Amino acid sequence: MIPDGYSVRPLALSDAAALAAAYDRNRDHLAPWDPVRPSDFYTVDGQQEAVARQLSLVEGGLLATWVLVHGDEVVGRVSLNNIVRGVLASATVGYWVDGRHTRRGLASALVEHACVEALAMGLHRVEAGTMLHNVASQKVLLRAGFTHYGMAAKLLFIAGDWQDHNLYQRILHDNPL
Ligand SMILES: CC(C)(COP(=O)(O)OP(=O)(O)OC[C@H]1O[C@@H](n2cnc3c(N)ncnc32)[C@H](O)[C@@H]1OP(=O)(O)O)[C@@H](O)C(=O)NCCC(=O)NCCS
């Protein structure tokens, strides 16, 4: 459940300014876990372009993405990326929480929210990868019912290098396709 004072809603084009501010406030907090961002990523125009791109993926059924809101600020995000239908019926969850709002259960609530939505979309499985030393993120996943199933060497280009990742998954149901 989302803690009092916070709400989660689907990403909208009107979030661009609040997102630019959130990413700017959280540069140092997110830098170890994110790709290196171009400078326009932190501008309203840059976010308007990024959000428009993401909303076209949402329209195509490849992405579902939400913002975590506190007052008039965006203080986190959760997304179901790489939505695949058919016999895989899976998506990859990604998330972050503003550095001033951590350790109050928000990421756990966001991941739970994404899993509830994934189930409602008819997906069978949600997966996630964390860098090997991202203990906080690993705790979030274990707390949300994910299990560790392996390690992928050099999986993602994060913070300027190909990084090994621990792999997690949560099976949402056992119903036939
Ligand atoms: C990782 C992150 C999402 C955690 O967000 P959060 O809202 O603080 O997480 P929660 O409050 O739901 O905490 C879940 C668990 O992680 C633990 N935790 C949170 N931050 C921690 C930290 N820095 N070190 C150790 N444990 C931590 C909590 O104590 C809790 O453990 P518990 O279940 O034993 O009580 C947040 O720190 C963040 O955005 N980090 C940068 C981006 C990132 O790593 N994204 C994920 C990429 S895979």
Image (cartoon, rainbow, N blue to C red):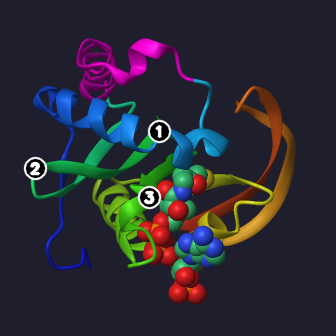
Quarter of the image that includes the N terminus: bottom left
> In this orientation, does residue 172 appear?
no
**Quick check: 10 above or below 24?**
below
Q: Are marks 1 and 2 in contact (CB under 8 Å)?
A: no
Q: How far across and down, in percent of the image, does residue 61 sit?
A: 32, 31
Residue at point 78% right, 65% down?
Answer: 149
From the image, tell me which residue sits under label 3: 99
Q: Alpha-carbon neighbours of circle 2 within 10 Å: few (<14), some, or many (≥20)?
A: few
**Quick check: 158 above or below 114?**
above
Q: Would the CB of label 3 be found within 8 Å of ligand 1?
A: yes
Q: Nearer the viewer, residue 119 or 158?
A: 158
Q: Nearer the viewer, residue 155 or 160?
A: 160
Q: Is residue 167 left or right of residue 95?
A: right
Q: Alpha-carbon neighbours of circle 1 within 10 Å: few (<14), some, or many (≥20)?
A: many
**Quick check: 176 above or below 140?**
above
At label 3, the amino acid type is Gly
Q: CA distance from mark 1 to mark 2?
A: 26 Å
From the image, tell me which residue sits under label 2: 72
Q: Earlier in the sequence, mark 2 or mark 3?
A: 2
Q: Nearer the viewer, residue 75 or 82?
A: 75
48 magenta-colored: yes
Q: CA distance from mark 1 to mark 3?
A: 23 Å
Region in magenta: 37-60
Q: How far across and down, in percent of the image, does residue 12 sit?
A: 15, 33
At label 1, the amino acid type is Asn
From the image, tell me which residue sits under label 1: 81
At label 2, the amino acid type is Asp
Residue at point 38% right, 42% down?
Answer: 25
